[in-house]
Amino acid sequence: MVHDEFSRSDDIAAILEMKRIAVVGLSDQPERPSYDVARYLQTRGYTIIPVNPNATEVLGEKAYPDLASLPEPPEVVDIFRRSEFVSDIVDQAIKVGAKAVWMQFDVIDREAALRARKAGLLVVMDRCMKVEHWQRSGR
């Protein structure tokens, strides 16, 4: 894998232990991958914080237009936006005090990932939280 430096098993395990996840780009449409992943994580005990300027509520949770609008910092920022939007999202994640950034499948920005890591955040790129959780938990 091209992005092995951002798919370290220890980082994945540490992030999966964190429970407050801001899902940037979380759709309110059940057929969308972001909805499926967030719903899965929610049913496994994670607190999901929808971040989508076009939604008011997703999965029974109040949605926020951006990370700066959250009432408290998330532990993880899970990104479901195209790669060209990642840099700004990572900068916001650093600014609000997130502990980790997770970029879903095909969401890739190596420079932003390096910037996040340099700021002290754990970073996983081009992986799916649902898949990783399922593989590690067996459910």
Image (cartoon, rainbow, N blue to C red):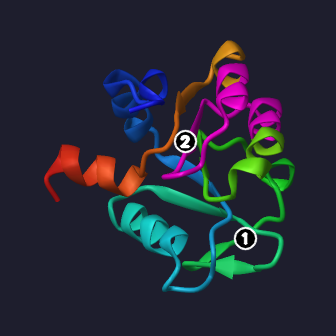
Residue named by callout 2: 102
Residue named by callout 1: 63
Query: Which quarter of the picture shows residue 75?
Result: top right
Q: What residue type is labelled 2?
A: Trp
Q: Nearer the viewer, residue 92 or 127?
A: 127
Using a 10 Å C-alpha cutoff, classify the residue at mark 1 as few (fewer than 14 neighbours), some (14 to 19) or many (20 or more).
many
Q: Nearer the viewer, residue 120 or 72?
A: 120
Specify whether residue 71 is in view. no
Could you tell me which quadrant the C terminus lies in?
bottom left
Q: Does the magenta stretch include residue 89?
A: no
Specify whether residue 13 is in view. yes
Q: Which residue lies furthest to the left in this view?
A: 138
Disc 2/disc 1 C-alpha distance (Å): 19 Å
Q: Classify residue 110 as left or right of residue 41.
A: right
Q: Classify residue 58 as left or right of residue 96.
A: left
Image location (x, y in percent) of residue 112: 72, 30
Q: Give the range drawn in magenta.
A: 90-115
Q: What residue type is labelled 1?
A: Ala
For marks 2 and 1 on the same chain, the one whose residue lies earlier in the sequence = 1
**SS at circle 1:** loop
Q: Does the magenta stretch include residue 106?
A: yes
Q: Nearer the viewer, residue 115 or 96?
A: 115
The correct choice, above or below, for 22 with respect to 14 in the image is below
Q: Classify residue 55 as left or right of residue 126.
A: right
Image location (x, y in percent) of residue 32: 53, 78
- Please identify, in this view, whether the residue under mark 2 or under mark 1 is nearer the observer: 2
Q: Residue furthest front?
A: 2
